[in-house]
Structures are given as structure tokens and as C-alpha cells.
Amino acid sequence: MNAIAKAIDSLNEAFGRLIAPLLAVITAIVIYDIAMRFLIGRPSDWAFDVTKMLFGAHFMLMAAYGLRHHAHVEVDVLKRLLSRRKQAALEILGYLIFFVPFIWMLLSLGWSFFERSFSRGETTYGMVAIPVYPVKAVIVVTAVLLLLQAIAVVLRAVQSLREENPA
């Protein structure tokens, strides 16, 4: 179990480190757009749409990395008062009751969202028609990565329960 959790952690760590520099690309595009406004008095036709889509993709794709590093908001005031065994049980229940249905919804609705966009050849409405479906595919990729990271969290909680309760 520990090997599976470590493999999932490694995958999301590598993916997060691959995606993180996308902020530099977004920043460069914004600076380019500002320079065009200043130098020629007119923004580029594509920069706003591209930065909006890249930022959305960056935000979504970093979610599993954030979960891996416990960077999301978590109210653990009461949780800290519990024993490690009860904390692990609470974590398992929380993921099964709240997280799994959310991921199922994100995965199924995200796939429908992507599929519809892809089948219609959806593009942006700006001067430059940029395909939208790759960004919508990010929703599905994010759901898969989050699900994998949730599996790692639950595996660690189960392992913690086993360590606390030798049979």
C-alpha cells in the first residue's frame, strides 16, 4: 500500500513541478500584451483569451499537487484533539462521503463538458478563434489526478489504522 501511495505522490509531485512554470509563461504573455498597449496603443488579439485559459488550466492542474502537500484549507481544530486512529477513521469517512462524490461529479460532468466542446469544435469568440476543448479536457485530467491523490491519502489512513491496531 505504501508503494502505491508513494508512486501517486511522485506522479503528482512531478506533474506539479512540470505545470508550475506555466505561471512564467502567463506572466510573459501579460507583459507582452501590456507592451503592445503601450507601444502601439492596441492590445493583441489573442493574449487575453490565452492567459485566461492558461491560468484556468494552471489552477486546475495544480490542485492534486496542492492536495499532496496539504495546501488546501482544512478545518482541523477538532481533528487535532482526536487520537491518530480516530483521525485516520475520520479522514477515510470524509473522503468517502464528501470527496468521492465530488470527484465523480467532476469526472462525469467534466467529460460531458469536454466531449460537447470537442464535438462542436468550440472556439473562443475573440478575433482569433482559439480551440476551447483542450482547456475543458483539463477538468477531466484534474479529476483523475485528484482521485489518485485521494487514494494515496486514504491508503495512508488505512495504513495508520493498521499500525494502531495490530491484529
Image (cartoon, grey):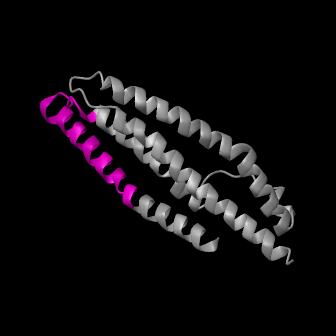
Residue at horizontal 73 percent and vertical 49 percent from the top: 96
User: Is 41 situated left or right of 72 in this image?
Assistant: left
- Number of callouts in the render? 0
Asked if the magenta segment contains residue 43, the reply would be yes
User: Quadrant where the N terminus lies?
Assistant: bottom right
Between 22 and 86, the residue placed more toward the observer is: 86
Q: Residue furthest bottom?
A: 166
Relative to residue 156, is residue 67 depicted above or below? Answer: above
Residue at horizontal 33 percent and vertical 23 percent from the top: 120
Relative to residue 67, is residue 55 depicted above or below? Answer: above
User: Is 164 situated left or right of 13 in this image?
Assistant: right
Residue 6 appears at what percent x and percent y? 56, 71
Residue at horizontal 43 percent and vertical 64 percent from the top: 14
Which SS type dominates the magenta stretch? helix
Asked if the magenta segment contains residue 82, the reply would be no
User: Is 132 situated left or right of 110 in this image?
Assistant: left
Residue at horizontal 29 percent and vertical 21 percent from the top: 125
Residue 28 appears at what percent x and percent y? 26, 48
User: Quadrant where the C terminus lies?
Assistant: bottom right
Highlighted range, magenta: 18-47
- Examine the rendering and report whether any part of residue 63 can be seen: no
Residue 61 appears at what percent x and percent y? 45, 49
Residue 101 appears at what percent x and percent y? 67, 40
- Examine the rendering and report whether any part of residue 110 can be seen: yes
Q: Residue furthest front?
A: 167
Residue 163, picture quadrant: bottom right
